[in-house]
Structures are given as C-alpha cells and as structure tokens.
C-alpha cells in the first residue's frame, strides 16, 4: 500500500535547496561571479526561513512535532535498524537530527554572509569583525556540506537495507510503500506555498543586483601586483 508522506512544498523545497546551496558553494571562490553567489545565497536563506515556518505549522511528517529527536528514539532507531521491526513514516530519528542541523547551519551561513556583505560593502559597523564573519560563513557552509553528505549516506543506507519502503522514490513522488495516515495540505498551506515559491526568487533577483565594493578589490589587486613586482 502506498501512502502520501511528503507533500509538494516539502519536496520542492528539498530540490530547490539542493540546487541553490550547491551552486552558491561552487561560486563561493569565484570573484567574477560574486553577484551570482550572493543571489543563490539569498535564495537559500529565504528558502530556509520558509522551511522553518513550515516546520511550525506544516502538515504531518513535515512538522517539527513529528521529528523523533529524543535520546530514547535515537537509541531505539540504532538498536532496531537492521531488524526492520520499526518503520518510520516520515524522518527517522537520525534523519530528523541531520535535517535540523542543516536548517541551523544553513541559517547561520546565510546570516553571516549577509552581515559580511553589509560590513564590507556598506561600511556599517555592526560590532563584529569581518574576519569572524568570514570564518563563520566558511565554517557553516562546510558543515552544511558535511550534513548534506550524511543525509545522502542515510538515503543510500535506506536503499540498501529498507528498499521496500521506497524512501528514495518518495523524494520524487511523495509516496512510501507503507500503511499509515497520509499527509494533507489545508487551504493555508496551499497559500503559503505560493509565497514560498515566489519570495525566494524575488530575493534572488534583489541580491543579484547588489553593489560590490570594487575599490577594495582594486586595492587588493594593486597590493598583490606591487608585492609581485618587489619579488
């Protein structure tokens, strides 16, 4: 029997987040494409904010109340994983923790990136050193990548040991091969998804048009060439 677990908002968020973060991460060290890095970074940040809100009032399985994160749940998950006596309709305990960590470090990455831009390009004194912000941004981005990798390993483990459940396919279709209650969207959820699909793209557009402090970059380049000439 197939049961509807992952509603459209959750699935579209999953894929947009994967595309947005991967692109922003790849563009992170490209000075000529900084505007695109800003744009995808803003896109990911707003996506995460909406997902945080959706976790507070979203439907079954996508709601944080359905995340089994207690130590008891973690222990039960570990001890019964290979026995297949316990089937989790939504996120299993380990996946729940990883997803929450992805949300947290993703928001830290987005906020630190915004503050870093504000400090470096608008000259505003926010009381936090640029070095600290840059380090926070880099560390949180790398942690995001690590947790995403763990998430992929978890999916691979489910494919190998619980293939009948259909976890991998559910990321695309929303359905798992289990018998339980189906997730359902109410009217508010359907209106919310419209904003969730529009606003991140709007911020993408705004961030792409941000001004970059070219004077500082020219100064850094000049210093580099002067040092090179001295050598």
Image: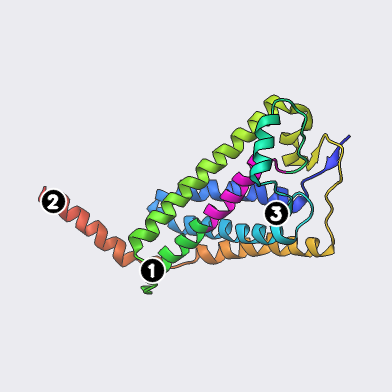
Q: Nearer the viewer, mark 3 or mark 1?
A: 3
Dominant secondary structure, magenta = helix
126 versus 116 height, above or below: below
Q: CA distance from mark 3 to mark 2?
A: 58 Å
In the rendered structure, find residue 229 and report the number of the disc placed on it.
2
Per the image, label 2 sits on a secondary structure element best described as helix
Is residue 63 at least partly visible in the picture?
no
* Pointer 1 or 2: first along the chain: 1
212 versus 41 height, above or below: below
Position of residue 216 measured from the top left corner of the image (x, y, whole percent): 30, 65
Q: Which residue is mark 1?
A: 119
Per the image, label 3 sits on a secondary structure element best described as helix
**Which residue shows up at 46% across the image and 46% down it?**
142
**Which residue shows up at 79% across the image and 52% down it?**
60
214 vs 90, left or right, is left
Per the image, label 1 sits on a secondary structure element best described as helix
Nearer to the camera, 126 or 124: 126
Q: CA distance from mark 3 to mark 1?
A: 34 Å
> Which quarter of the picture shows residue 152?
top right
Q: Nearer the viewer, mark 1 or mark 2?
A: 1
Position of residue 40 measured from the top left corner of the image (x, y, whole percent): 54, 55
Q: Which residues are magenta?
A: 91-107
């Amino acid at each position: 029997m197939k049961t509807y677990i992952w509603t459209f908002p959750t699935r579209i968020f999953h894929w947009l987040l994967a595309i947005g973060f991967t692109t922003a991460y790849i563009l992170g060290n490209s000075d000529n494409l900084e505007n695109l890095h800003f744009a995808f970074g803003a896109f990911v940040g707003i996506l995460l904010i909406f997902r945080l809100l959706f976790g507070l009032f979203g439907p079954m399985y996508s709601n944080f109340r359905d995340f089994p994160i207690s130590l008891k749940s973690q222990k039960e998950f570990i001890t019964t994983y290979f026995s297949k006596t316990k089937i989790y309709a939504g996120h299993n305990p380990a996946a729940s923790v990883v997803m929450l960590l992805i949300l947290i470090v993703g928001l830290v990455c987005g906020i630190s990136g915004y503050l870093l831009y504000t400090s470096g390009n608008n000259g505003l004194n926010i009381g936090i050193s640029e070095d600290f912000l840059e380090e926070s941004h880099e560390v949180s981005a790398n942690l995001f990548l690590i947790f995403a990798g763990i998430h992929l390993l978890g999916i691979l483990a489910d494919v190998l040991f619980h293939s009948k459940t259909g976890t991998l396919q559910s990321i695309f279709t929303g359905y798992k091969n289990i018998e339980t209650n189906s997730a359902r969207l109410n009217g508010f959820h359907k209106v919310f998804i419209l904003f969730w699909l529009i606003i991140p793209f709007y911020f993408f557009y705004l961030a792409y048009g941000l001004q970059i402090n070219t004077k500082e970059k020219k100064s850094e380049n000049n210093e580099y060439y002067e040092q090179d000439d001295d050598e």
